[in-house]
Amino acid sequence: MQQQSPQMFPAMVPSIPSSNITTEQIQKYLDENKKLIMAIMENQNLGKLAECAQYQALLQKNLMYLAAIADAQPPPPTTGPAPAPAMASQMLQQPETSLGGSGANVGLRVGKQDGAEGQ
């Protein structure tokens, strides 16, 4: 990546997230963040810590703004219990149907029988 100065990344961050932010605007922040991360990595490799700090400050502003947008979103509607806890409770109620059940013991018994016959 070509060396860029921190002034090339304008501070796009408004103070308060607007309620009508578009997907395209969010994508612009994500693209800028990618460029900032690449610039930070490049400057770290070159030992330019002052430039890294400036890029990191801009990146943090963008991340804080995107987090504020995410926090301002209404929570998604809940339609019922989450599938993961339901699946876990089914496994606890029926441990004999798990793969580690009797099938593994049969394999061990067969191995012991074969070893006993060979002696």
Image: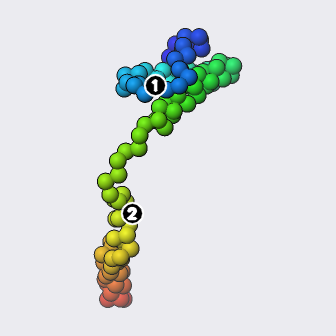
Q: Residues within 10 Å of mark 2 (few under 14, many from 20)?
A: few
The residue wearing badge 2 is: 85
Gap between marks 1 and 2 measured at Cα: 36 Å
Q: Residue at x 35, y 59 (%)?
A: 81
- The amino acid at mark 1 is Ser
> Quarter holding the C terminus?
bottom left
- The amino acid at mark 2 is Pro
Q: Along the polypeptide, which appears first: circle 1 or circle 2?
A: 1
Q: What is the quadrant of residue 9 in the picture?
A: top right
Q: Residue at x 43, y 27 (%)?
A: 19
SS state under label 2: helix
Q: Is any atom of residue 82 visible in this view?
A: yes
Location of residue 93 in the rendering, given as x and y in whole percent from the top left corner: 35, 76
Q: What is the quadrant of residue 24 in the picture?
A: top left
Q: Residue at x 55, y 30 (%)?
A: 64
Q: Nearer the viewer, residue 75 or 102?
A: 75
Q: Residue at x 48, y 21 (%)?
A: 32
Residue lying furthest right in this view?
50
Classify 75 as above or below 86. Answer: above
Q: Which mark is residue 18?
A: 1
Q: What is the quadrant of residue 101 in the picture?
A: bottom left
Q: Is residue 80 left or right of residue 66?
A: left
Classify 38 as above or below 75. Answer: above
Q: Is any atom of residue 27 visible in this view?
A: no
SS state under label 1: loop
Callout in the foreground (1, 2):
1
Location of residue 61 in the rendering, given as x and y in whole percent from the top left corner: 57, 25
Location of residue 108 in the rendering, given as x and y in whole percent from the top left corner: 36, 80
Q: Are marks 1 and 2 in contact (CB under 8 Å)?
A: no
Q: Is residue 112 left or right of residue 46?
A: left
